[in-house]
């Protein structure tokens, strides 16, 4: 089964939550990259602390991706 067929089989609530999870996953990655790249942030956070926070956000995004993938495989079977 492909991605589109599985989304068609889900209820509207499950589809909404799946898409919301994808959006949040993307936002966590964007926030982490922003912390790494943005030199003059409005809130002053020392660079080592920004790297730590960005790393935590990336790890959390990977965890969410893993859980999303498990949920997707569960529906596929």
Image (spheres, rainbow, N blue to C red):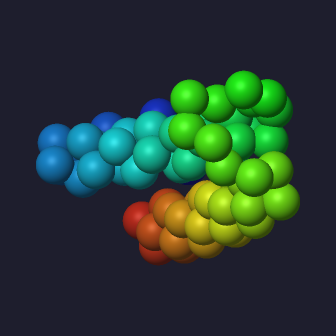
In this view of the protein, can residue 11 be seen by the observer? yes
Q: Where is residue 30 in the image (x, y as percent from the top left)?
A: 63, 36
Q: Is residue 63 above or below residue 7?
A: below
Q: In this view, does 11 lie above or below 66?
A: above
Q: Position of residue 8 (x, y in %)?
A: 32, 39
Q: Is 49 placed left or right of 17 in the picture?
A: right
Report the front residue among 53 and 66.
53
In this view of the protein, can residue 10 be seen by the observer? no
| Residue drawn at 16 percent across, 49 percent down | 13
| Residue drawn at 67 percent across, 61 percent down | 53
Q: Is 45 placed left or right of 39 in the picture?
A: left
| Residue drawn at 53 percent across, 71 percent down | 67
Circle count: 0
Q: Is 13 placed left or right of 54 in the picture?
A: left
Q: Which image quadrant for residue 29? A: top right
| Residue drawn at 28 percent across, 50 percent down | 17
Q: Where is residue 39 in the image (x, y as percent from the top left)?
A: 79, 29
Q: Which image quadrant for residue 48? A: bottom right
Report the front residue among 77 and 57.
57
Q: Is residue 17 above or below residue 49?
A: above
Report the front residue among 58 and 72.
58
Q: Position of residue 32 (x, y in %)?
A: 68, 46
């Amino acid at each position: 089964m492909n991605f589109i067929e599985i989304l068609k089989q889900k209820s509207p609530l499950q589809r909404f939550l799946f898409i919301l999870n994808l959006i949040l996953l993307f936002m966590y990655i964007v926030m982490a990259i922003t912390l790494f790249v943005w030199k003059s942030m409005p809130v002053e956070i020392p660079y080592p602390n920004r790297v730590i926070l960005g790393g935590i956000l990336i790890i959390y995004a990977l965890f969410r991706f893993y859980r999303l993938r498990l949920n997707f495989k569960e529906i596929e079977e």
